[in-house]
Amino acid sequence: MDNGHEIINHDNIFSFTVRDIDGKDFSMSKLQGKKIMIVNVASKCGFTPQYEQLESLYEKYKSEGFIIVAFPANNFMNQEPFSNSEIKKFCSLNYNVTFPVMEKISVKGENKAPIFQWLTNKKYNKNPTEKLYGIFRNS
């Protein structure tokens, strides 16, 4: 598992290993060659119905090498209060989610997960525009 001090050692998204919602290692390297959409999600957010739309999008395009990787986080007004097991149950029962959902992480602040540190900092990800393509938010 990566720690916050190791983000410098990542040349690309595929060098990260994160944990899935069940706590198992998930190597991003197995996504090489795919079109990846990374999303930050929350169960009690006004945009929670996005799970249904994301699942529909995933089902429509997964045969073309498209994949969604969801990262639940509780950084925005405590909108993800659930544990990993509760998040998994919520996604399955309410939205029949089949795309990969990772363990709950922090996506901002001092405890920001290494993968999100990398995604949001052009010093590491070499994205000259400083815009995030692949992490979609309403803003």
Image: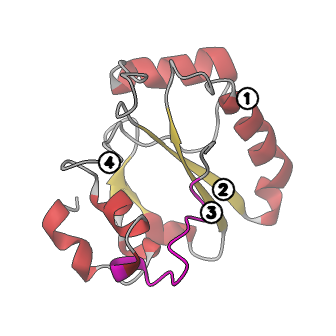
In which quarter of the view is residue 82 placed? top left
Q: CA distance from mark 2 to mark 1?
A: 15 Å
Sooner in the amino-acid sequence: mark 4 or mark 2? 2
Residue 124 falls inside the magenta stretch: yes
Q: For the residues carrying marks 2 and 1, which lies nearer the camera in this image?
A: 1
Answer above or below: position of 126 versus 60.
below
Main secondary structure of the magenta stretch = loop
- Disc 4 residue type? Lys
Q: What residue did someone put label 2 on?
A: 67
Give how far across and how far down residue 56 sits, in percent: 80, 38
Marks 3 and 4 in Cβ contact (< 8 Å)? no
Sooner in the amino-acid sequence: mark 1 or mark 4? 1
Bounds of the magenta segment: 123-135
Q: CA distance from mark 4 to mark 2?
A: 23 Å
Sooner in the amino-acid sequence: mark 1 or mark 3? 3
Q: What residue did someone put label 3 on?
A: 36
Q: For the residues carrying marks 3 and 4, which lies nearer the camera in this image?
A: 4
Marks 3 and 2 in Cβ contact (< 8 Å)? yes
Give how far across and how far down residue 54 sits, in percent: 71, 39
Sooner in the amino-acid sequence: mark 3 or mark 2? 3
Q: What residue did someone put label 4 on?
A: 108
Badge 3 marks a residue whose secondary structure is strand
Q: What residue did someone put label 1 on?
A: 52
Sooner in the amino-acid sequence: mark 2 or mark 1? 1
Marks 2 and 1 in Cβ contact (< 8 Å)? no
- Disc 3 residue type? Ile
Q: CA distance from mark 3 to mark 2?
A: 5 Å
- Quadrant into which the N terminus falls: bottom left
* Residue found 41% across the figure and 24% down from its top: 80
Q: CA distance from mark 1 to mark 4?
A: 25 Å
Marks 1 and 4 in Cβ contact (< 8 Å)? no
Badge 1 marks a residue whose secondary structure is helix
